[in-house]
Image (cartoon, rainbow, N blue to C red):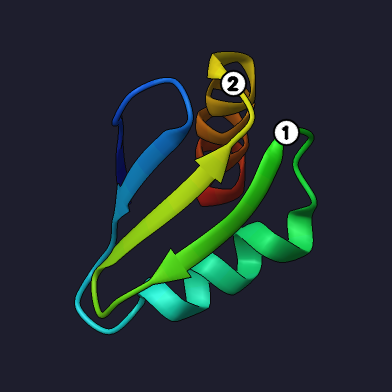
């Protein structure tokens, strides 16, 4: 999983082909503070966040969950 900010309120998360909906559902279930919602394609997820602090929490949580 790779993530990059796209402004202060949007993160783009890239996954393996076919895994985006599974990862997006996992992000939604984690209820990370400041994460508003997700939209998943085949290998890309847009994650709406309230601010950059929420983006940082998202990245940190994704790293923890990957381990």
Q: Which mark is residue 34?
A: 1
57 lies left or right of 40:
right
39 lies left or right of 5:
right
The quadrant the C terminus occupies is top right
Q: Which residue is nearer to you in this view: 6 or 58?
A: 6
- The image quarter containing residue 4 is top left
Residue at point 80% right, 51% down? 31
**Mark 1 surroundings: few (<14), some (14-19) or many (≥20) residues within 10 A:** some
Residue at point 55% right, 20% down? 56
Q: Is residue 9 above or below residue 21?
A: above
Q: Which residue is nearer to you in this view: 51 or 56?
A: 51
Residue farthest along the bottom direction in this orientation: 18
Residue at point 53% right, 27% down? 55
Mark 1 element type:
loop
21 lies left or right of 61:
left
The image shows residue 63 at horizontal and vertical percentages of: 51, 36
**Mark 2 surroundings: few (<14), some (14-19) or many (≥20) residues within 10 A:** some
The image shows residue 58 at horizontal and vertical percentages of: 58, 35
- The image quarter containing residue 61 is top right
Residue at point 27% right, 84% down? 18
Residue that badge 2 annotates = 51
Q: Is residue 35 above or below residue 25?
A: above
Q: Are the two marked residues, 1 and 2, in contact with CB atoms closer than 8 angstroms?
A: yes
Residue farthest along the left direction in this orientation: 17
- The image quarter containing residue 41 is bottom left
The image shows residue 24 at horizontal and vertical percentages of: 52, 67
Q: Which mark is residue 43?
A: none
Alpha carbon separation for disc pair 1 and 2: 7 Å
């Amino acid at each position: 999983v790779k993530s990059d900010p796209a402004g202060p309120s949007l993160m783009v998360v890239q996954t393996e082909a076919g895994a985006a909906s599974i990862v997006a559902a996992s992000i939604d279930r984690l209820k990370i503070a400041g994460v508003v919602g997700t939209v998943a394609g085949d290998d890309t997820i847009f994650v709406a966040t309230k601010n950059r602090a929420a983006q940082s929490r998202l990245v940190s949580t994704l790293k923890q969950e990957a381990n």
